[in-house]
Image (cartoon, rainbow, N blue to C red):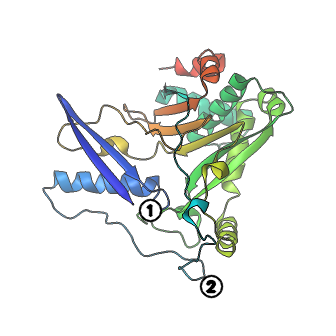
């Protein structure tokens, strides 16, 4: 099943719910679809200005049809199990994010660290503190990102599919907390920069030689912080006749302790809303983290 849309009519508005198969499409393609749907609505049924690109990208020398090494569905189907997490949104103003980015770059004497990397680095440090882990414990912060622009030649931004990879920064608790924000952000920056065309194709080729359907056990682990979605998605630009959306929220699946989901802030201007998912005891700790609260109070 690829896509399910449910529209719930409320007394004073509507709620649009969307569920899609991540093996078929990524966040870029999902929000491209939502933008096209909104454009069709606003234009009275006219064609969209940016139609999706359906031509498939396949690694040279490989057949696009792959035989998976399974003989029973239980080998690759994983049933959803509801777990007890606390979720909270933290809103970062554009001013706070500018200060975060400037601080991270200044500490590393560079201008290469992005706003997104700075925000994720801050949350990596704060979540690690909230977990009260031993200082010699190994930890990882991973990011899911589109490979479209990193391939040579690059794929179109309108490529419809799921060309995403996961990279991560690694450290010990002691190193992460002893060094500043810039050090943490630079670990993430290096992980992204090093995942170039060659690295992407090597990873794809490795999977083609030994294909596997990933389960939660492969994607989520202990002491992990995982960032998904993107504040660059034009979530609030999708309009269906009732004005700008009041809020964007994610569902209950693909959640784990340490999952952070990035959204653009409703006020725009480079602001961000971040959904943080943690075990209850860790959520209690992070809500009193001084470093985090100092940036949330900047307007």
| Residue 277 image offset from top left, x and y in percent | 56, 32
* Disc marking residue 61: 2
- How far apart are the two marked residues, 1 and 2, measured between alpha carbons? 24 Å
Residue 94, percent across and down?
A: 47, 30
| Residue 16 visible at all | yes
Query: How far from the left and from the top, in percent, is residue 189?
Result: 68, 47
- Element under disc 2: loop
Q: Is residue 40 left or right of residue 159?
A: left
Who's the residue at 83% across and 34% down the image? Answer: 137
- Specify the quadrant that holds the N terminus: bottom left
**Left or right of residue 224, residue 173 in this image:** right
Q: Please tell me which residue lies in front, 285 or 159.
A: 285
Residue drawn 40% across and 64% down?
Answer: 158
Residue in the image at 65% along x and 43% along y: 111
Between 115 and 33, the residue placed more toward the observer is 33
First along the sequence among labels 1 and 2: 2
């Amino acid at each position: 099943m690829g896509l399910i849309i449910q529209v719930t009519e409320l007394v004073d508005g509507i709620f649009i719910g969307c569920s899609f198969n991540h093996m078929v499409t990524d966040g870029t393609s999902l929000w491209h679809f939502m933008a096209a749907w909104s454009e069709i609505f606003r234009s009275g049924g006219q064609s969209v200005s940016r139609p999706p690109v359906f031509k498939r990208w396949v690694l040279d020398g490989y057949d696009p049809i792959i035989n998976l090494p399974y003989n029973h569905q239980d080998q690759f189907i994983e049933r959803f199990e509801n777990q007890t997490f606390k979720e909270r949104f933290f809103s970062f103003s554009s001013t706070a994010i500018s200060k975060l980015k400037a601080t991270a770059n200044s500490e590393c004497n560079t201008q290469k660290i992005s706003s997104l990397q700075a925000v994720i680095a801050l949350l990596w440090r704060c979540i690690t503190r909230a977990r009260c882990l031993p200082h010699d414990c190994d930890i990882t912060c991973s990011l899911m990102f589109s490979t479209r622009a990193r391939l040579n030649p690059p794929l179109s931004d309108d490529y419809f599919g799921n060309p995403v990879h996961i990279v991560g920064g690694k450290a010990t608790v002691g190193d992460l907390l002893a060094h500043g924000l810039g050090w943490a952000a630079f670990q993430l920056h290096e992980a992204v920069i090093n995942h170039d065309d060659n690295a992407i194709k090597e990873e794809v080729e490795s999977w083609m030689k030994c294909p596997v359907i990933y389960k939660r056990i492969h994607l989520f682990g202990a002491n992990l912080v995982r960032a998904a979605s993107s504040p660059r998605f034009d979530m609030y630009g999708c309009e269906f006749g009732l004005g700008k959306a009041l809020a964007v929220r994610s569902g209950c699946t693909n959640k784990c302790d340490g999952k952070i989901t990035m959204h653009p802030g409703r006020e725009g201007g480079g602001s961000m809303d971040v959904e943080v998912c943690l075990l209850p005891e860790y959520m209690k700790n992070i809500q009193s983290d001084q470093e985090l609260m100092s940036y949330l109070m900047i307007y």
